[in-house]
Image: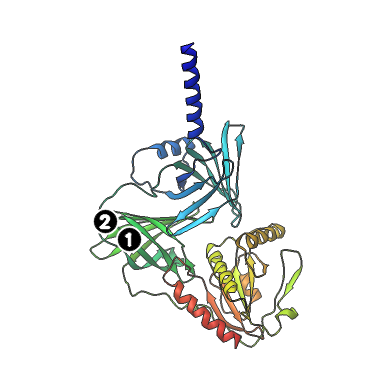
Amino acid sequence: MRTTTLFMVLAILLSGCLEFDHPYKVLAPGIWRGQLQLIPKVTIKERRDAALSTEPELSEGKLPFVFEVFNPTSDSIYIEIINGDERIPVKDIQYGRNPETARDTIRINFPIYDTYLTADIDGNKMDGFWTVKSRKNYKIPFSARYGKNYRFTTLKKKPVMDISGLWPALFDEGEDQYSAIGAFQQKGNHLSGTFMTETGDYRFLEGTVQDDKMYLSAFDGSHAFLFEGKINPADSTITGGFRSGKHYQTSWTAKMNNHAGLKDPEKLVQTKDTLTPVYLELPRPDGQQWSLDDPSLAGKPVILQIMGTWCPNCRDEGAFLADYLKHHPKTPVQVIGLAFEKYDDPNHSMAVINNYQKILKIPYPIVLAGKPKKENVLSLFPQLDNFRAYPTMIFLDKEHRIVKVHTGFNGPATPEYDHFKKEFEIIIRSLSQ
């Protein structure tokens, strides 16, 4: 009798323990460390072994990022991806059982960018892939481990110098090399910041400085950026490498100069013809045609946003425009988005645009303008001498003639953002007169 009673008590305690330890159905709530393997030919087993290793040193070609899992209820889940000061909420998540592996599986969708993460779940481990649907057969191995709250490493090697400040940089692509400015903030070993270019920025980057090495990364569902560099304190220079996903790699060099600046974004593209009004007639996601000659736009200044749903800088610019219109409801200027999409099927592009507009709560119309090729943009705007970047804002007066072109967008991750907002106000006032 005493043995039976003891067995029952132990059974109750154990069952209570198990339920207490696993009150969730999918992923443990809290911080996870994710990793994308940008260098190919690494097996899932090798990724698991590497992720389980206690060695905190850094490995080439591995892009780390951190995300937090939330379980509002026992059967619901969402995550927030953390890049520096930015948190990106992701709520479109599906989960189930993989009959081939007999493991729980998860799919984390980024519908704005038409990409997704898929993984098998094994306790506090995930292993799978990041897939980009707009690129043919584009998959990057992905893994994540629960409870690891560091990005690159747990090491605390003393930095050879504080690299906070501005670093004019040259990215070497041979004939296509381009300039940028690194804007870094360092506190001890922690490093954050971005790279600004004349056409946009690399958004919120986060990483570390260890001895004479610096590392920065960002993953936002659309792009996977990894920067690595060697610091030379003798002449305040950095020499490094940059990877974007698995498809692009280049080198870069930089030298500290806190007086560095970018070219004026309103002088990168010139207007050859300031007298001929712009004429556009393009399809809307609802299947109807949109025209710049619509009576509702007669005598009204217009901002044409050349963008793509695949472009994070376009998303930042769209968020800025949406917020501006929200706080200035009586603005007499109409904003129209011209989306240049990568898909061959126009119906797919329309669906992506419609989804993008709903999720981001974009209050202005977005129409399909074609595929993202320079010649396609210039065919719509023969008044321009060139086209440089997505996004680009084209400002039209009340007669729909081009009065200003703003190339690129250096957003909230950059020190240029506050200056841009002031300049935008000046342009709006001049258009409204």
> With respect to residue 18, does 271 lie above or below?
below
Extreme-left residue of the structure: 234
Between residue 361 and residue 215, name the one nearer to us: 361
Numbered-mark total: 2
* Label ID, residue 159: 2
Amino acid on which the number 1 mark rests in the picture: Gln
Q: Please determine whether, in this image, residue 309 is positioned above or below residue 16.
A: below
Residue 331: numbered disc = none
Tag 2's secondary structure? loop
Is residue 13 at least partly visible in the picture?
A: yes
- For the C terminus, the quadrant is bottom right
Q: Amino acid at mark 2?
A: Pro
Q: Nearer the viewer, mark 1 or mark 2?
A: 1
- Give the crowd class for mark 1: few <14, some 14-19, many >=20 residues within 10 Å: some
Q: Which of 24 and 201 lies nearest the eye of the viewer?
A: 24
- The residue that mark 1 highlights is 186
- Residue 188: which quarter of the image? bottom left
255 up-or-down from 62: above or below: below
